[in-house]
Structure formats: structure tokens, C-alpha cells
Amino acid sequence: MSAPSTERIASIEQVAAELKEAAAFIGSRVVNREEVIEQAFCALLTAEHVLLQSRTGAGKSLLAEQIFNMFEGARTFRVQASKEQQPDTYFGGLDLDELKRGRIIHNTMGSLVESEFGFIDEIFDANDFTLRALLSLLNERRLLRGVQDVPSPLHTVIAATNYLRVSEVTEALLDRFMFKAVILPDKDPFIQYKISQQYLQHGGKTIEPPARISYARLQSLHDIIRGRSDEFSIRVSNELLYFTNITIRQFEFLRNRQAADKRSAGAGADFYISPRTQAKSLDLLRALALLKGRSEVVHDDASRLYFIFATVGLPEEVALFKKAYTTVLNSLTASRGFDQITMLLDFADVVERLRQEPHRVKQPLSQFSTDHVRRSFFEWIKEKFGSEQPQDHNRMVLEQFLTDFVPVCDEVRELKHSVEMMLQQALITIERELQRQQ
């Protein structure tokens, strides 16, 4: 099945305004759920799945249906899971003629396989056999059953549940849902009043929005998020990329320290953030910037990464991520560590380019000062050695820079150590390559 055509975007600011209006409309229908709605829009922009957990009657179905109803040109598959269901509920009925030949082939028309959106209510009521069959469709967007291998246009699934069921299969299933939220009942009288107003007007049903967003436009926005757009890009600086990774590591450390306390009390387990999840956080950063109408990621965007590393709606988890973010941010800001990180990362870029093109080490290092690398390193060269360097002094310059570099905090000290090892390995590679060329 061919992918839907994408739609031209006038500006990042325009689409941000459209998404803001759509989120506000959903928020007027599903009261006091602004953060979960923002999280769901991030899932749509990044083409990831969402798991909503709450007690019965908290509006999970209404929220999911109203979100999908904001888009036109996309097929939505809906199902209420149960233990009696088999995979054909999701993949389409079996082809009986093929079954007689001993081949399991699903007629996928109208199934989740041929849908862009999916809503699975009470997903943990499904049996483990069916959930296991769903794993490849949710992750690889392919139906893989026996000899059948069918690509799927599936973009985002929202699943709802009243409870979590723990097994080897459900743990793998949870890993497919990058975004998770717990919707806690709100007993504030005014909130309940606003919910009652909406119920009296619409009877708990979805309603048509004043404007809908085409699915083709959503695909265009997803291309921007993934860096596949020829028209727009959202920049993530090297310094912010490094800051994000050490914030994530700090959060993982805090969660594991918390888990160790629970293990000492007879409960808890190690907390682990996979490289795949950490890499996908970059898509979320760009989505958060786009929602704000920006073409560049800023530090504050990293503070919202709890959308995937914590469970929205659980204050303890969210607060722990915010603590990790604030701890790292304050450490680097108070010590002017960001400037040093930028300088070291620029230096690492120079070393890496020399490793890739060893012949350039015979030229003055100032050749790099007109490139994308910032000038801080070259200002140091000029101050230390003068404006131009003899070509045979380049190695001394590179090593002397790190010798003179005094880190202002632990985060920078760790980065300097990594860059020192990188430099020594690169110099060995460069020397070998130059000897080979002689």
C-alpha cells in the first residue's frame, strides 16, 4: 500500500497555531487533561503509540476518539479487547482456501493492518497469544504471521486499560507504547461542574471540530520531526544534545537509587532506559519545539522529556525527572559549564574531521575556523601560539589545548576525559594513514 502524499507547510508557526487550536478544542471536550493531550500530540508527531490507564469512567475512550476525530483522511480501527479474541480480530479473518493448504493468511481489508490509527480499549483483557501477535505490527509496522509479511500504514495506536497485567509478553507490549499516562479522577467541584456541562451538551460523545487537520499534513509534520523534510528542519545543537543525554543519565541514576531503596524493603527492580528509547527522545525534542512554533530546540524542551521517560499523571515520576533536569541545568549554568561543553564538542568535531581526512593535519588548523565549528577553539590557538601555526606543530596544539583546559564541573570533567581518549585514538589513526601514504 502506497504512503499518503504529504502536504506543503507554509511555516512552522502556522502549523503550531493549528495544533494549538486542535488541542484547545479537545481540552474543551475532555476537561482538565491538557498535559495528556499535549503528550498525545507529541505521539502523533513522532508516530508513536500511547497507553492510557485509569479507573472506569475517566473518559479514556472519549479522549482517544476525539483526538483521532481531529484528523481527516485517515482510517481508524476500533476494538474492545477480550480474552476470547484471536489475532484475526486485529489482522482480519483467515483465508479459508489458504488455510486448507496449511497457510495462515489474513484478509487484512478493514483491519488494524490497513489503518492509520487504532484504538484498543481494555488492551490487557486480550490473551497473551494475541498480544504477542501484535508486537511486530506495533513496532515494525508489518504483519508477520507465518509466511505472510504485509507492510502497514499504521501511524499511532491509543490503547486504554483499567489495570496493568504483568507477564513476559505484556512487558514487551508496554515497550511498544513510548508514551504512557495515568488519568487520575479529579474530585475538584469546579472541574466536576465543567465535566457535567460537557455531558449535558454532548452526552459523552465526540463532536465534529470546527476545523480538521488532514492526515497528509500530519505526515508532513512527521517528516520534519524525523529530518526528512526538504523545506523545514528543527535544529538540535551539539551542546543541547549532550545536555539532554546527561539529564537522561541523571534521571536513570535517580530512578535506580529509588529502586534500590525499594529492593531493600523487599520490592522494586532495576530501571533501564534502552538506547532505542534514548534515541527517540530526539524526535520528541523536535516535536516539542514544533508545538511551540520554533525551528530550534531549547533547554526548556528537555524538561518535557518526562513524556516518554516517566508516566504522565504520576507526580512522583514526573517530579523525579524534573529534579534530574534541574540538577544538571543548575550545575552547568552556575559554573558556565555550557560554554566549556560547546568548546570541547567543537574541538571533538575538529579531531573527528582530521581523523576522517588525515591529509588536513599537514595544513594550518585555522582552515577549520570558517567551517560550522564555533571559533572558541581557534581564538585559544591565536592567543596561545599566534595567528598561524607551522604545520608540524598541529599535534602539539591539539594536545596542549586539552592540557590547558580546566573543567569547571564534574559534567565537563567527564566530557574532557572522553575527548582526550578520542584525540589519542585519532592521532594514532592519522599517523598510520600518513605513513601508509608515504
Image: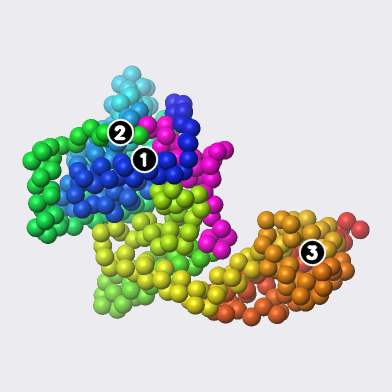
Which mark sits nearer the N-terminus, 1 or 2?
A: 1
Which contiguous range is marked in magenta? 214-241
Which mark sits nearer the N-terminus, 2 or 3?
A: 2
- The label nearer to you, 1 versus 3, is 1
Q: Is residue 152 in sight in this rendering?
A: no
34 shown above or below 300: above
Task: Measure how far apart labels 1 and 2 are at the Cα level.
Answer: 9 Å
Q: Do the residues bearing badges 1 and 2 touch, measured as CB atoms within 8 Å?
A: yes
Q: Which residue is mark 1?
A: 18
**Residue type for callout 1:** Glu
Across and down, in percent, residue 389 comes to 84, 69
Crowding at mark 3 (Cα within 10 Å: few <14, some 14-19, many 20+) = many
Per the image, label 3 sits on a secondary structure element best described as helix
315 with respect to 280 (left or right): left
Across and down, in percent, residue 345 comes to 63, 65
Across and down, in percent, residue 124 comes to 23, 48
**Residue type for callout 2:** Ala
* Colour logic: rainbow
**Residue type for callout 3:** Leu
Which residue is pictured at 37% across the width and 66% down the height? 321
Q: Nearer the viewer, residue 258 or 202?
A: 202
Task: Measure how far apart labels 1 and 3 are at the Cα level.
Answer: 48 Å
In the rendered image, the quadrant that contains the N terminus is top left
Per the image, label 1 sits on a secondary structure element best described as helix
7 shown above or below 128: above
Q: Which residue is mark 3?
A: 365
Which residue is pictured at 72% across the width and 63% down the height? 351
Q: Which residue is mark 2?
A: 211
